[in-house]
Each structure stands twice: as structure tokens, then as C-alpha cells.
Amino acid sequence: METDPSRPAGTDTAAAMTTFDGILEEVGGFGRFQKRIFALLCVCSLPFAGVYVGIVFQGFTPDHWCRDPAVVERGQVCGWSLADTRRLTVPRVNSSGTAQLSSCEQYEVDWNSSARTCDAQELDLSTALTVPCKHGWDYDYEGRRSFVTEFDLVCSDGWLVDMYQAMLNVGFLFGSLAIGYLADRLGRKMTFLMSNLFNGIAGILVALAPSYVSLLVFRALYGFGVKGGWMVGYVLVTELVGVEFRRTVGILYQMFFSIGLLILPPLAYFIAEWRWLQVVITAPYILMLSYYWFIPESPRWLLSQKKTSKAVKITEDMAKENKMTLSKNIETLTGDTADSDSTSASFLDLIRTPKMRKHTLILSYNWFTSAVVYQGLVMRLGIMGGNVYIDFLISGLVEFPAAFLILFTIERIGRRLPFATANIVAGASCFITAFIPDSMFWAKTVVACIGRLGITMTFEMVVFVNTELYPTFVRNLGVSVCSTLCDVGGIIAPFLLYRLAVIWLELPLIIFGSLAFLAGGLVLLLPETRGVPLPDTIEDIEFPNRVKEQTATMNQQLTTFLSSTDISTDKHPTMV
């Protein structure tokens, strides 16, 4: 075959090879095919919300007091009211400056003594000895039954409620790594379906757990599959769309988590039994097994595994559904070569050089802070004493502006300033909320919602900022390592909230505010990435000005070459 001498060397080879991103420009970066897959995979975010913060309803701790069978028996004989029975069972204690009936102590009284009168008003037990509850607790169920009331996880066993959420995050931690590995080895679609099957089984086991120990084990298994499957769905949908749509699709995929938050309160209101609520939350994972017939494998993954014929078939189906025509030589479809060196990445690459080390530490801390503050603020709704359904619904609604604020600001202002501002606003809101008196209910609610909006923005922004601050060959590893701190934060969050709230109800907010303020300050130390090409090497990170100078020099040389040889880009569009 003769070669056109007017074409630059290597152009024929470049024309013969077609990348998947190049194909997407023809078949449509976000056509009907991608929109259908996007809608199906967004369903995965709905039950994830119930799994992540369902403890607010499933682990609700109602008002409770010691049960004393002798007092109950005596009350039945004497005709005492429930209020009289409770007053004669438990002493009053000082709680936050007010005298309240104790939840964890009871009077030590011999109710079988014939000297005891039936006149409840004449009985004075203020001098009687008090002891910890001996015969369990009675609960003001308020129409709801949680695993707290079923397993008596109150008073000295109250910390076990924290373990319920901590074990979920332990599952998240190990599941994200394991399922991410499987997704690279077995494929996105197969791993997604396997995780849904695993989630369905583990979720039902949680609902059937006969003891609290087994409940914790099944909860960890549940977490193992849930987050990993959600992440695989995120990867699959972003790999199917064009480059210009990835960030928007990724943010909207996360926004469906907020829709799941709005669905959860009415579900919990109408399903008062925590076990049945668990079944309903798990049901979508079982239904998503039907996706075997509705979603494709990622063509990018197929190309990376040299399964070109399958990738070509899916791409042709994509073009057909999008009603587009392929003009490029699709049989020469190749994968992205940018990831070819990913196997050579190591953890040391993340900390060996100064700027890489700084990025890793700051991003890891922001992942940690986002998880602690976000989970803490959500779970706090369950201990505030108000209408948990209304409070949860309102706080869920304020998450929606977060996605739109991000989409509006990141290309106009940049990444660093909105990211830092969101952290600082969240921190300031936590501090202010802590010191607003309870009598100013709506003011307290509004400020708390602003804090929730801020931390939601940081949680959504840290995902893509993380990807923009690492070079290509270590990008996946960098995101995986930094995001593990998210799960560590999730393990710590319930202990910070529930244990510190025992000392002072607003103390957790002071801790959350401090963490968020520090995170915002650290973000200001990161470089701005708006309009900056993704780095390919560590040198791009460590010496960004040198890279810019080299790029400018190359562009200048190319311009000079084109001018001197009188090559027109109109005649040779392949050089554009």
C-alpha cells in the first residue's frame, strides 16, 4: 500500500487505531442507551441510603425505665396508674440541670412487707437505696420496635448500639477493597450482580438474626457487599458515558442517595417493626438481580481484557439504540493506554515525594472528616427528642442543593474554594447549633440544615477532587487508599456521637465543628485543578510549572513547524 508523502509519519497507524472515547463521540456520549443504563444503576443508590443511616429508625432508643415485677404486682392490687408505678420504681436524677426519672436505676424496696400502704401519694422512697436495673426495662414504644428494645441495649449496654453502625463500616472497609479487586478481574457487570446477590442474602440474615452477636456479624457481611456494589455501579455508569458527561453523571448518581434518604422516613413510619423495615430495604438488591438482562458489561473493561469482539458488539448496540451511525473502523477498537502502567503503582508512590505526600494526607483527612461529620449529623437526629420523621425529612431535603451548587461552581469558581468553603460552613454551623438554646427550635434547625448541606457538598466533592490530584498510573490506588479513611471515620462516628452525647448532648457538635474547620483550612493548601489537564506522572504533580513551560514550548515548536512547512490544518484535520 502506498503512503501519502504529504501525511506526517505515524498518521496512518493512528488512523488505523480507534479508541473507545473516539467511538463515543460518534455514538453519543450520553444518548438513549446510556440514559437507560444510568437510570437503572441509580436505583442502587436508593437502598444504600437505608443501609447507611437506617440505624436512626432501626436503632431508635425510646424512653425507658427499670422494670420491677414486685411493683407491677403491687400496683395491680392497689390500682396504681402507670405514672405511679414508674415513680415508685425509679428515682429522680439530675440530667443536664433538670431532675428526671432515672432510666438505669431502681429503688431497692421490699414490696412484700405488709407495712406498705396502697396509697401511692403517701409512699416516700426518697431515702431508699438505689441499684442498677435488675429485671430489665419497660419502654415507651411510641408504636415502634427497634433492635434496641428487643435486645435491651440501654444503660451499660448502650455502647453496643454503636457497634451496629461500626460493624457496617468495617464491612465497607474490607468490601470496597475486595469487590474493587473482583471488578477488575471478573468484570463490572458480573461483580455488580454478585454483590447484589450477596446483599440480598446478608440483608435477609440481618432481619432474621436471633441474637445481637449474630446481628453484628450479619451486619458486617451486609456492609461488605453494599458499598462495593454501589462503587461498581458508579464505575460502570461513568465508563459508559463520554468524557464531558462523567463528572455530571457521577454527581447525579450520588444525588440518588439523597432521594433514598427522603424515601426512608415514610417507610419507617409505616413499617414500625425494625425487622420488616430491614426486609424492605433489602428487597431492591434482590430485584436488581434482573439487571442481568438489562445492563451491559463495560466495553472499556472488555477492551482491557482483550475481549474486543464483545466490546464491539456492545458498542454497535449502543449506536443502534442511540440512532447513530458509526463511520470509524470499529474493528480496530482499542482500550485506553493510560492505564497500562497501573500495575506498577505502589503505596510508596503516594508518600515518597513532598507534594504527593501532602495530597495524600490532606485528602485522607477530608475523607475521614466527611464520614465522621456526615454520619454524626444524620444519626444525631435519632437522639434529639423531636419528631424524628419530620426532622429526617427536612435534613434530607437540604442535600439536593448540594449537587447543583457543585455543578454550578466547580467550572466557574474552581474546586479548591467551594471545597474549603463547604467544610468551613459545615464546621461553623456545628459550633453555632451547639450554642443555640432549644427554645429557638427553628433557628437551631435552619443552622443545622446549613451544616448538613455543607458536609454533603464536601462528601461529593472529595470524590472527584481526589481523582484530579493523582497521576494516571497511581490514580485508582490513590483514591482507594484515601477513601479507606472514610470507612475508618464511619467506624468512629457512632462512638463519638452516642458516648459524648451522654456527657453533653451538644458536645459531639463541637468535635464535628473542629474537624470540619481543620479540613477546610487544609483544603486551601491544595492546588486548584480547574482547567488543568489530568497529571500523567509524579513529575506533573511535583513540578507543575515546568510541565506548563514544556507544554508551551512544544506548542510553540509545533506552530513554528506548521508555519515553516505551510501545512494547513484544513487539509489535514487529523493533526488538530
Image: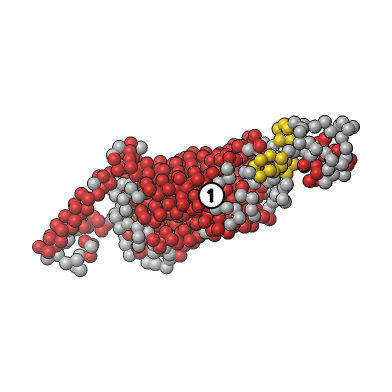
**In this view, 491 is above or below 527:** above
Neighbourhood count class around disc 1 (C-alpha, 10 Å): few under 14, some 14–19, many 20 upward: some
Residue 423 at what x, y percent from top left? 43, 51
Give 96 or 209, whichever is nearer the viewer. 96
Residue 141 at what x, y percent from top left? 72, 47
Q: Give the residue at x 75% y 31%.
A: 129
Where does label 1 land, which residue?
Answer: 434
The quadrant in which residue 209 appears is top right
Label 1 is placed on what type of residue?
Ala
The quadrant in which residue 76 appears is top right
- Which quadrant of the figure contains the N terminus? bottom left
Residue 293 appears in view: no
Q: Give the residue at x 21% y 61%.
A: 575
**In this view, 404 is above or below 155:** below
**In this view, 528 is above or below 538:** below
Residue 136 at what x, y percent from top left? 73, 36
